[in-house]
Amino acid sequence: MSMYQLPKNITDALDKQRRIFLWQSNGPKKKYHLIKWTVVCKTKCRGGLGIKNIWKMNISLLCKWWWKLEHEVGLWQTIVKAKYMGGNSLIASIKNRIDDSPIWSDLLKVRHIYLRGRSTKVKNGKCTLFWEEAWFKQKPLCTLHPVLYDLCLDKHITVHHFVLKHAQLQFSRWLPPLLFSSWISLVGEIYSYPFENENDVIFWKLSRNGKFSTISIYDLLTSGDSGFSFTSIWKARIPHRIKVFLWLLENGVVLTKDNLLKRN
């Protein structure tokens, strides 16, 4: 799971075994699956049992290699940078190639998720994309100024090259007065940015210490989950099996007579 992106049929097969084990242990007798597996895999603070979602955990483990590639030095980093990056330090601009290895192809599939947590403190701007990275006002310029981005022909320019070119970027057509004034205003704001003659600093904005963790990516992937938090149950000083029973009771799925009738 930390090297390859598992195919869906594999994760489905693993989840099937986990569901069976959860509800009937290793006994031969079949038992009812009382709650949807998607609910079971939610965190306890969102109404679930906190069992990890395999697909999301797989993605979280793969994303750590991008962090290692950018922050650690070693033989494999040297080989990968020489073979796939060609001296390019901008991971956001790397393209797929026909001769990519299976592992590298899988890493490219999760890169967009990694970039959601990656942030850059711009100093000289050599390692930061001007339009597509959130280096200015905490949001990418392509989302702050979508029309200008669509018209610009230099979409993958770095902040450093923007400064070297004195903001003389190429656009697909003349900018009307309203867009031109917006562009001039943006250029003025950017030139007031305190640039420094040092390398850009890459940090992880999803954690307090600025360093990558797989749990922070997992939390990002599960941030859309919702549900009632049964805090009083999980904090109670009672055996865990009783906690799970109370959780089932609160969800209204204990096999009382009315639920047995619903299940025929």
Image (cartoon, rainbow, N blue to C red):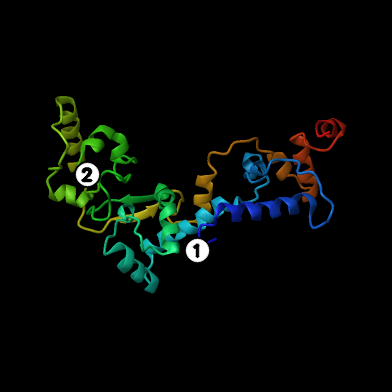
On the rendered structure, is 123 left or right of 118? Answer: left
Q: Residue furthest bottom?
A: 75
Q: Secondary structure at mark 2?
A: loop
Are there few (<14), some (14-19), or many (20+) residues within 10 Å of tag 2?
A: few
Q: Can you tell which quarter of the image residue 264 is in?
A: top right
Residue 147 lies, in percent from the top left, at 25, 32
Q: Is residue 79 above or below residue 32?
A: below
Q: Earlier in the sequence, mark 2 or mark 1?
A: 1
Residue 14 lies, in percent from the top left, at 65, 55
Query: Which numbered mark, 2 or 1, is in the foreground of this view?
Result: 1
Question: To which residue does mark 1 refer?
Answer: 3
- The quadrant of the picture occupied by the N terminus is bottom right
Q: Which mark is residue 193?
A: 2
Residue 48 lies, in percent from the top left, at 66, 42
Q: Is residue 101 visible?
A: yes
The residue shown at (65%, 54%) is 13
* Residue closest to the eye, 9 or 74: 9
Give the residue type at disc 1. Met
Q: Which mark is residue 65?
A: none
On the rendered structure, is 214 left or right of 133? Answer: right
Give the residue type at disc 2. Tyr
